[in-house]
Amino acid sequence: MINFPKIDFPQLKSKLQVKSPWDRIIIMLLSLLITIPIFIILHQNLIDLEWAFNLDRVFIFIFVFTAIFFLLMYLRTIIILCIAVYLLVLVYGTVIGNYGFSEISEDYNSMIYTMSDNPFPQDIIVAKLLPFPNKSKIINAIEYQNPKVRNFAIMATSKHFKGIKGYSDYRTIIQCFAVFKEINSRWNYVNDPKEGDYIATASESLEYFSGDCDDHSILMAAAIRSIGGTPRLIHTKGHIYPEILIGSLIDLEKVNYLIKNVLFVKESYGKKIHYHIDERGQVWMNLDYTAKYPGGPFMYEEILGALTLK
């Protein structure tokens, strides 16, 4: 009879679970990086109990950090492996001058900065994680190099705000606002067929200035980009609308003055300018078909996805 050596399973399990100090340090740092944006979201959305020294927020931070730490420790093997692979990717990106350590640090810092200054910080996270519907079709439909689209945009700049002087630094934005005025003054909302989404190209929409929200957004984005503006499309609850890059908060102040005192005085009188600040601190202004002036009211506040066209 063969006598097999006895195996002490508790001891073996203990040996397999031995953790190096570096595991804990790495997991702790990763937990901290994940905790900060989650805490900002909770801080902005939970009722302030007004405890002394903000102890309620301190407890929330500690609870979130502890929960994430133990979860990552439980999955530490695969987490450490993923981190190692990601670090190699960042090293490669840094060497070839693509997306590396400095870029990810800048993105993270700007995201945290923007979230802390945003009443809906979760929108910034969601916009990065969720896919944009019909993305490839929409990108192909934004025919900003089509001569018909560019000629239309040029016509709009000649028709509206041509005589505005003294704002040479904002000439492109003023011309993009001229495009907005021309499109929105002529747009006729028409639903898609019942069978599903119909994505009209920008040149197609120029025929009758009719279609639904994605058709309007495509035409607006194409025309704006054709004359040097930077548009993006925002996906929200059952709706897509265009925005234009304004720049910094200082630029926003000047553009706000232009809208209210020079370009759209009657339309914007006594009304609020609506915009978003992205993870890099850049200001984007609403150009929805429902708006009578740039920065008009949002149909929905929540952002489910963003498609930037550069």
Image (spheres, rainbow, N blue to C red):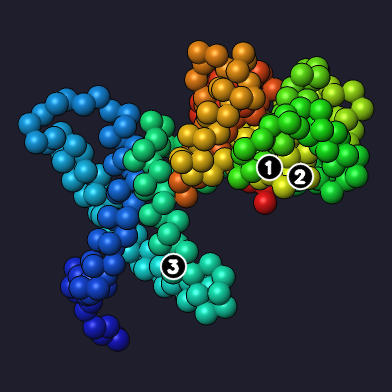
Q: Amino acid at mark 1?
A: Thr
The residue singled out by tag 2 in the image is 227
Q: Position of residue 47 (x, y in %)?
A: 25, 24
| Residue visible at 20% across and 73% down in the picture | 21
Q: Amino acid at mark 3?
A: Ser
Residue with the most extreme left position: 52
Q: Are the residues at dot 1 and dot 2 in contact (C-beta closer than 8 Å)?
A: yes
The CA span between labels 1 and 2 is: 7 Å
The residue singled out by tag 1 in the image is 172
Vertical side of 9 occupied by 205: above or below: above
The CA span between labels 3 and 2 is: 32 Å
The CA span between labels 3 and 1 is: 31 Å
Residue 7 visible in the shown view: yes
Q: Position of residue 209 (x, y in %)?
A: 85, 24
The residue singled out by tag 3 in the image is 102
Q: Looking at the image, is mark 1 or mark 2 earlier in the sequence?
A: 1
